[in-house]
Each structure stands twice: as C-alpha cells, then as structure tokens.
Image (tube, rainbow, N blue to C red):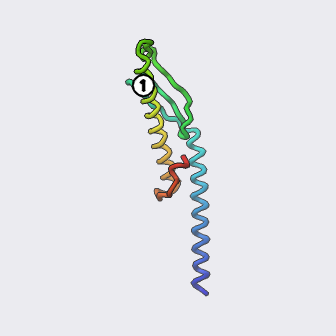
C-alpha cells in the first residue's frame, strides 16, 4: 500500500506540472498577439508587419516598387515579404513555445501558434 500512496503523490506532482505548463502556454499565446515582426523584400521596397499570431498589421510599398507596366514583379515582392514575415513570426512562436515547455516536444503544439 505504501507504494500506491507514493505513486499517487507523483501523479499529483505531474498534474501540477502539467497545469503550470498549460498556464505558461496560455501566457505565450497571449504574448504572441502583441509581438510584431516585419518581413521585407526587394531590399526594403516592400515591408509587411504581422503579429506573432500571423495577423497582418501593415503593408508598406515604396513608390519605386510600383510600375503599372510590371505588376507581376510587385506581386512577387509582396508575396516574398509576406513569406518572410510569416517565417519570422513562426520563429518567435517556436521560441515562446520552447520557453513554455522547457524545450520538451509536445505533439501538435506547433498548430497552437
């Protein structure tokens, strides 16, 4: 019976740690809403700012990037800046996730951010 009691204490400790990790993850998610990163392309001709939750906050296009005869290039620049911003937001989210979990990989966690 003694081992059973010790095992239950360990289970309580594990549950407490899981609750603490859950609280840290929730805090990390809330922080991501206020974090902003900027993606750029064309040497800064196009800039896109997104939050850590991938919400687009602003798009800036330099006049030099606008050529009515070559819209396709501008489209490519916007797409590249968007991809850059999302990549940076993913890196920030991954860092916050690692901080919250102590680096412990948790399946499906990458879809939370």
Q: What residue did someone put label 1 on?
A: 77
Which residue is at a point 45% across and 23% down the rendered structure image? 75
Q: Position of residue 25 (x, y in %)?
A: 57, 52
Q: Quadrant of the N terminus?
A: bottom right
Seen in the picture, residue 17 relative to 65 is either above or below; the reply is below
Q: Residue at x 58, y 40 (%)?
A: 33
Q: Residue at x 42, y 12 (%)?
A: 69
Instruction: Reply above or below: 47 against 8.
Output: above
Q: Is residue 77 left or right of residue 2?
A: left
Q: Above or below — where is 57 with respect to 17?
A: above
Dividing the picture into quarters, in which one does residue 13 lie? bottom right
Provide residue 65's location: percent of width, then percent of height. Answer: 42, 17
Q: Residue furthest bottom?
A: 1
Compare residues 5 and 75 and report the one nearer the observer: 75
- Image coordinates for residue 92, horizontal then vertical, percent: 48, 43
Foreground pick, 46 / 2 = 46
Residue 78 as seen in the image, left or right of residue 5: left
Q: Which residue sits at x=49%, y=35%? A: 37
**Residue 30 in the image, given as x and y percentages of width and height:** 60, 45
- Give the SS element for disc 1: helix
The image shows a total of numbered marks equal to 1
Q: Is residue 9 left or right of residue 68?
A: right
């Amino acid at each position: 019976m003694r081992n059973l009691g010790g095992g239950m204490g360990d289970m309580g400790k594990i549950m407490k740690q899981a609750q603490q990790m859950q609280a840290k993850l929730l805090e990390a998610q809330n922080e991501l809403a206020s974090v902003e990163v900027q993606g750029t392309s064309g040497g800064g001709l196009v800039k896109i700012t997104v939050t850590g939750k991938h919400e687009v906050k602003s798009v800036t296009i330099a006049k030099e990037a606008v050529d009515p005869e070559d819209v396709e290039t501008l489209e490519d620049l916007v797409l590249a800046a968007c991809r850059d911003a999302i990549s940076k937001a993913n890196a920030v989210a991954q860092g916050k996730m690692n901080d919250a979990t102590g680096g412990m990989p948790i399946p499906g966690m990458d879809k939370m951010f």
